[in-house]
Image: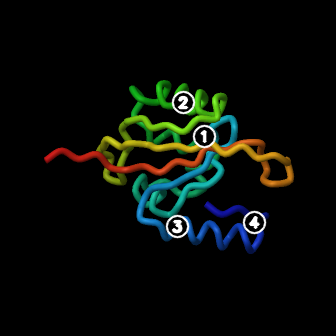
Amino acid sequence: MASAGQSAEQARQAQDVDAIPTLAWSARPDCSAEFLNRRWLDYTALSAEEASDWGWTAALHTEDRDRLMDFWRHLLDSGQAGGIEAHLRRYDGDYRWFLSCSVTFQFKRPSDISSASSVFTMRLTITSA
């Protein structure tokens, strides 16, 4: 999800993240979406505009939404890494279980990025045999 004010370096980094074979995203300290990679957008069939800020929560199952938000806020507050399972809506409307693994990064200077901390998440599909 590129922004209009994105630098060439930020655009290159976004391209690199788009190349990894997983759904990945980053969030601001309030858990609103800062970046969603192409695979995440394609999987959920949301456009970058639809998924920006809080729009990404439309892809979460309503029964999981509050639990996930509480978990991610806890990670931001504690600075810990963690994982949680939840349903994510696929492009065809079907909900699939995912393991969402998150790492919180704290930046020492505000000039390092636009916010003081971010959550970077990669989602892995959970399937049963």
Q: What residue is at 42 percent from the left and 52 percent from the top?
A: 44
- Marking on residue 110: none
Seen at 65% across and 50% down, the residue is 34
Q: Mark 4 = which residue? A: 6
Sequence-wise, the earlier of marks 1 and 3 is: 3
Residues marked 2 and 4 touching at CB (< 8 Å): no
Q: Residue at x 53, y 44 (%)?
A: 56
Residue of label 3: 18
Q: In the shown orientation, is residue 54 left or right of residue 41?
A: right
Whether tag 3 and tag 2 are in contact, CB under 8 A, the answer is no
Measure how far apart labels 4 and 3 are at the Cα level.
15 Å
Q: Secondary structure at mark 4?
A: loop
Residue type indicated by callout 4: Gln
Rounded to the nearest angstrom, the CA distance separating label 1 from label 3 is: 20 Å
Type of residue at label 1?
Trp
Around disc 4, counting alpha carbons within 10 Å, would you say few (fewer than 14), some (14 to 19), or many (20 or more)? few
Please state which of residues 93 and 24 is positioned toward the viewer in this rendering.
24
Label 2 sits on residue: 69
Disc nearer the start of the sequence (4/3): 4
Mark 1, residue position? 54
First along the sequence among labels 3 and 2: 3
